[in-house]
């Protein structure tokens, strides 16, 4: 895990920032992939949808569009509801992972005082 620099430390070099962003993107992609796999498995197992239809439904919910197929079973309906709630929270987590390094770098630029560099 990357450690963010404190307000009294210099901004990290651009190459280190790019590495930090790449790490965040990889973690976000991993979370999206795992979430998609969970959705596909749930739709395939609980609603007996084909893998293609499971992918379509899971990706549409993950993308915030909603399911394509109507759920026919009680367990499938419960899964779809819980999966939708999970995806809503997951969206916020992924967005945070992607925007946190950028926001930190911008805000750190406002807080860092180059005149204080030799005093701490």
Image: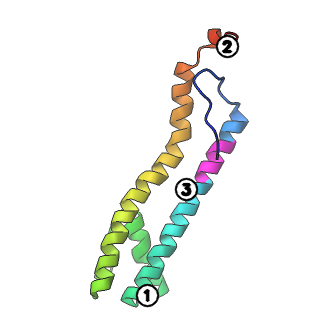
Q: Residue 36 location in percent, x, y? A: 49, 71
> Which mark is nearer the camera, 1 or 2?
2
Residue at 48% from the left image edge and 53% from the top image edge: 94
Is residue 65 visible to us here?
no
**Callout 2 secondary element:** loop
| Relative depth, front residue between 41 and 3 | 3
Residue at 42% from the left image edge and 73% from the top image edge: 58
Cβ atoms at labels 2 and 3 below 8 Å apart = no
Q: Residue 92 location in percent, x, y? A: 41, 52
Residue topped by disc 2: 117
Residue topped by disc 3: 28
* Magenta span includes 20: yes
Write down the quadrant of residue 101 in the picture: top right
Residue topped by disc 1: 45
Cβ atoms at labels 1 and 2 below 8 Å apart = no
**Callout 3 secondary element:** helix
Q: Earlier in the sequence, mark 1 or mark 2?
A: 1
Q: Which residues are magenta?
A: 19-25
Residue at 59% from the left image edge and 49% from the top image edge: 24
Identify whether 64 is placed above or below 108.
Answer: below
Query: Mainly helix, strand or loop, the magenta region?
Result: helix
Identify whether 89 is placed above or below 113.
Answer: below
Residue at 63% from the left image edge and 11% from the top image edge: 116
Write down the quadrant of residue 19 in the picture: top right
């Amino acid at each position: 895990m990357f450690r963010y620099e404190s307000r009294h430390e210099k901004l990290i070099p651009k190459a280190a920032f790019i590495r930090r962003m790449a790490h965040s993107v990889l973690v976000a992609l991993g979370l999206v992939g795992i979430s998609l796999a969970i959705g596909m498995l749930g739709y395939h197992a609980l609603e007996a949808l084909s893998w293609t239809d499971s992918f379509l439904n899971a990706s549409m919910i993950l993308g915030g569009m909603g399911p394509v197929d109507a759920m026919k079973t009680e367990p499938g309906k419960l899964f779809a509801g819980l999966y939708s709630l999970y995806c809503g929270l997951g969206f916020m987590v992924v967005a945070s992972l992607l925007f946190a390094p950028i926001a930190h770098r911008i805000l750190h630029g406002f807080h860092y005082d180059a005149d204080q560099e030799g005093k701490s």
